[in-house]
Image (cartoon, rainbow, N blue to C red):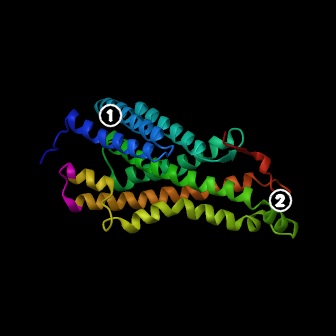
Amino acid sequence: MHVIPLSPLDLTLAALLVVALAGLVWAQRLELARPLLIAAVRTAVQLGLIGLVLEVLFSSMNPTLIALVAMFMLAVAGYEVMSRQQRRLVGFWGYGVGTVAMFVSSFGVAVLTLLVMVQPEPWYAPQYAIPLLGMLLGNTMTGIALGLDRLTQGLWRERPQIETRLALGESWLEASAAVRHEALRSALTPIINSMAAAGVVSLPGMMTGQILGGSPPMEAVKYQILMMFLISAGTGFGALGAVQFSARRLFDERQRLRLERLRAKV
């Protein structure tokens, strides 16, 4: 079974659906039409460029080039995490916390998967490494961004209550526990919902792509189960680390809440 090729006309018709949606959104006087069209253009350009890059990677199998692409993906994901927060840590911390958390969680899970579970030859084969890392980074990025945004917004909003609890002798861990728990709940809710609905409400993208590409359905199912578990682990570990470290950063050595270490989004 071969993959049915798509013509430029097919993609144009799909793009016209997005344009029609933007028109309806504009007619409703919602300020979302422009972002929607910009996002659509970015999608086409970025995916087109990554397609060219992947063709080069697949043909060269150069580990240095693969590592450079992986680090570029991480750098962009780190910027996206930072830009999605209404209030973020000042200085390098605003970028570094999310980026390091994604590196440890996503790269760690990806390397473990390639070496122990999938075991391609070589283990860094770009046909497996880049898509796997891309899915892990994309979902972990969303989880960490949601968690950090909810954490900083919560600490800002609950400042009087938290400082009262600190004055009564509680540690920063105890005083910020409710906000940290809510931040982690926000970070993990999307992946929990995705796992709960997978196969019943929706067919996940990786599984759908493999089936369209001609893979046996049960083999596609096994890969999708693997990916859902990996994504949940990567997102969870990354969000836990980022939320915990960021919360600690916002309290000084004397257990005082230091919200001046946050900067509001301009």
Residue at 30%, 39% (x, y): give it: 16
Residue in front for this viewpoint, 13 or 140: 13
Residue in front for this viewpoint, 159 or 62: 159
Residue at 50%, 56% (x, y): give it: 235
Looking at marks 1 and 2 on the same chain, the residue that comes earlier in the sequence is marked by: 1
Mark 1 → mark 2, Cα distance in angstroms: 50 Å
Identity, as a three-letter code, of the amino acid under mark 2: Gln
- From the top left corner, tell me how far across and down residue 226 is, in percent: 36, 60
Location of mark 2 (residue): 255
Q: Is residue 213 magenta?
A: yes
| Span of residues in magenta | 212-218
Task: Say if 79 sits above or below 142 in the image.
Answer: above
Q: Is residue 258 visible?
A: yes
- From the top left corner, tell me how far across and down residue 22 is, in percent: 40, 42
Identity, as a three-letter code, of the amino acid under mark 1: Gly
Q: Is residue 125 visible?
A: no
Task: Say if 103 sits above or below 46 in the image.
Answer: below
Outermost residue, left side: 1
Q: Quadrant of residue 217?
A: bottom left
- From the top left corner, tell me how far across and down residue 28 is, in percent: 45, 48
Residue in front for this viewpoint, 118 or 152: 152
Q: Is residue 142 magenta?
A: no
Location of mark 1 (residue): 51
In the displayed structure image, the side of residue 172 where residue 12 appears, left or right = left
In the displayed structure image, the side of residue 158 where residue 4 appears, left or right = left
